[in-house]
Amino acid sequence: MENKEKKDIFESIWHFLASVQLAIIVLITLAISSIIGTFVEQKAEPAQNIALLAKFFGDSAAPSVYNVFAKLGFMDMYGSWWFTTFLVIFSINLIVCSIDRFPKTWRFIKTPQKPMSGSAIKSLPIKKELTFKAGINTIKDEFMNSLKASKYHVSEATEENSVRLYTQKGKYARLAVYVVHLSIILIFIGAIIGIRFGFKGYLNLPEGSTSNVLYESQTKSIPLGFYVKCNWYDTQYYEGGDMPKEFQSELVIIEDGKEVLKKVIEVNDPLTYKGITFFQSNYGMMPNAVGQFVLDITPAGRQEKRIWLRFGETFEIPGTGIKGRIHDFSPALTRDRNTGRLITYSDNMVNPAVAIEFMPPDGNNYVGWILKRYPETGIIPGGHSVKFVDYWGVEYTGLQVSKDPGVWLIYLASILMGISLYICFFISSKKIWVDISGDKKTVSVVVGGTTNRSRLNFEREIDQILAHASHAIEGRSNK
Amino acid sequence: MNSSVFFDISAGAYIAAMITYVIYLVIRNGTVGLVASGITIFGFVSQTAALIIRWINSYDFWMSSHPMSGFMEALLRGAPLRNLYESLIFFVWSIILGHILIEFKYKNRSLGAFVTPIAAMALLFIDISGTSKEIQPLIPALQSNWLLFHVLLSFLGYAAFGVSFGAAAAYLIMVTESKKEIPYIIGSVITGIFIVVLVGMGIDFLSLSAAERAQLIQSHFLRASLRSASGGVAAVSWVVSIAFIFVVWQFGLGLKKVLGGLNLTHTMLDEIEYKSIAVGFPLFTIGGLIMGAIWANSAWGKYWTWDPKETWSLITWFVYALYLHARFVGGWRGKRVAILALIGFVAVIFTYLGVNLVLSGLHSYGSG
């Protein structure tokens, strides 16, 4: 007695966890709570969301409403205990309902199809009845042909005064839905593996410097196991404006004192070494840094030469006697529209320019601005060219660094999900039965079928098979 | 060659087609129906030409700034699916394609009156939202091979959901007996709100100077009516809007007689509603969610960050997953699932437009 009760409780819990009602409730709950999470800014400064809440609840009530919301986890909702709980319930529901239903589907697939009598076929959801004045065998042959033409493998059973045909197609498609469920679970497992065994962090690496750690937060660093060096960082712009075209860094991996890998990374084109991936994420200027000016110098008609200089240092354009001295620098030079004066309009290297004081042998010194983005500004009298390549050593590259050993599982599950979703919606499991019975004069044919998908389509298919067969039978009896 | 002429021709054709379809619905004259289909196909051909020309132009545009690119790279980066304007144009193209396919398959023109308005509303939206029609350079984040496939499949999915919205709306009108039925109330209110918002934006558009129009959604959204600074204007707008939604609810059922007179059956509408979702759901799951996640991972090393765009596409996915489970396992039928089809498309619109335009005031993400 007690045992039975226990079993009942277990069973009802099982049924609840397997039920589509639970699925519906969980989906609605996840949807609604996710909506709230998109309106309340996640992991933000309290003031931001208090200001948002003030629009709905008024200035005085907003802070206390905020506190209630914050306690309930709405400010970091997707990581809150209750949202995680719903995701767990969602997974349990997926698993339990799949386990619950799978045996039935499996039995359905494994049970051989049996022929059906005319009266049994008439109880199917889709059924058609026809009569012919032709021989049973003729009719059978034509129905066989018509079904074969529609790519069915037909079996037949002969009874007294009747022939029964039966066939099915796509029975394994019924498994696809389980594969979809499985792939969702695999994605969750992949995500858990990533959280448990992987890491996500960042690394701001100044030009020319090397690091063997990355940072998860300002205080927590994680060792890389090797060294990474940033050779240079560069932003490229589209012509005629300040729209960025590419953010690039040249990274070098150094292990045991040796350079093992070198790559210029861009957004959408990271570098991966030993499972750790470096993504171009942002960039910036280092405060108070002093860098070096990289210039490409080409005396008219001669070879180009690259030189590195510090502020105030001088150089000579080979063979010309013209000397130059670094005079000034602006990270973003422009001409003020109103005053016509040269100004710096940004702290970032949007339009870097170097002012060089040129000192020709004749003593007529002059200062010229050379812009990195506009090499034609570097042509000086005499046809010589001074190209401003970079002000190197003042920028850092902002790298997003991650290791995610679960991501392959997520990709695999995604492919699995894509294929199984396709099968789920576009391949239906269909069964057709035909009963041909009667005496020599009139033969009645009953055709019926079942499907797990679109009934209307299947009905159309059966109609076509019927029409095809009837046409052929009539053709033969007219001969 | 400039694509805008062909776009204008197609936009004109779709709006003309919408009117013709509605006339066809009312007077049920076969010739009118044929004309409506003809105009639609004409518009579609013109728009296809426009898309191809734009693609060629964007290809050249890419090549001019990236002369070292190979043919495939320039082709992928030049695909005209790169900003709000281009994606909306593609959405219209896909929904019209879906409509033409259905018309051929079901040999029935009546659904046109429900689907072409969605296309026309999208075109109207493009114009009044002041979104830029220029070919713009591609920012680094968008320079990925995933861009084309992600956006292409997502929008084919969105268009399929749009068709299911049209079918569900027509279905609800056909099967509703009384105006007091809850599914009908929900359906007519959703439709009413769509129209109110669009008209409200139209008023914004007219009240703004040409320069301000580019910022319509970001800074002036419904400021000329429902969200007006003047209390009187706002109050009147609300009253008029509610009255209008009431009118939609009150007279929407009038379409029932019209629909009944055509050989449009509610089983057929129910099937189109489901089938569009059956096409849209895998496209959206694979193209929208999965490819989006893979792209995010290859660009930033995070496949899922719960940002509003991602979250809203997941919400959309939940709604359609709910539709499918309620329908096939839960035994929900007819009106109840039709409502879910309507809600699903509202989520689609919010995923695409709402997040970029409305939530961008709250979040840094998404400038279109």
Image (tube, rainbow, N blue to C red):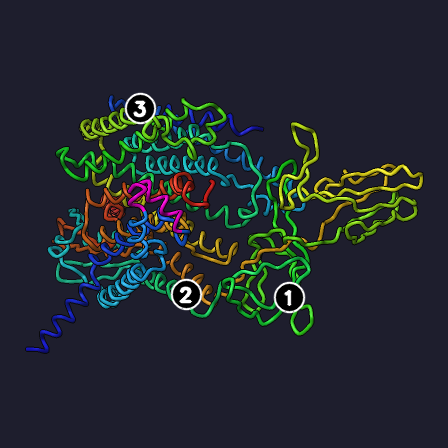
Residue at point 27%, 38% (across, down): B167
Residue at point 40%, 43% (across, down): B362
Q: Is residue A58 magenta?
A: yes
The residue at which mark 1 appears reads as A253
Direction from residue A452 to residue A249 in the image, left or right: right
Quick check: marks 1 and 2 in contact, CB under 8 Å? no
Q: Position of residue B285 (x, y in %)?
A: 38, 52
Residue A408 seen in the figure: yes
Quick check: marks 3 and 1 in contact, CB under 8 Å? no
Q: Nearer the viewer, mark 1 or mark 2?
A: 1
Q: Quadrant of the N terminus of chain A?
A: bottom left
The numbered mark at residue A427 is none
The answer to whether A133 is drawn above or below residue A192 in the figure is above
Q: Position of residue B69 (x, y in %)?
A: 64, 46
The residue at which mark 3 appears reads as B233
Instruction: Give residue B276's quadrant in the image.
Output: top left
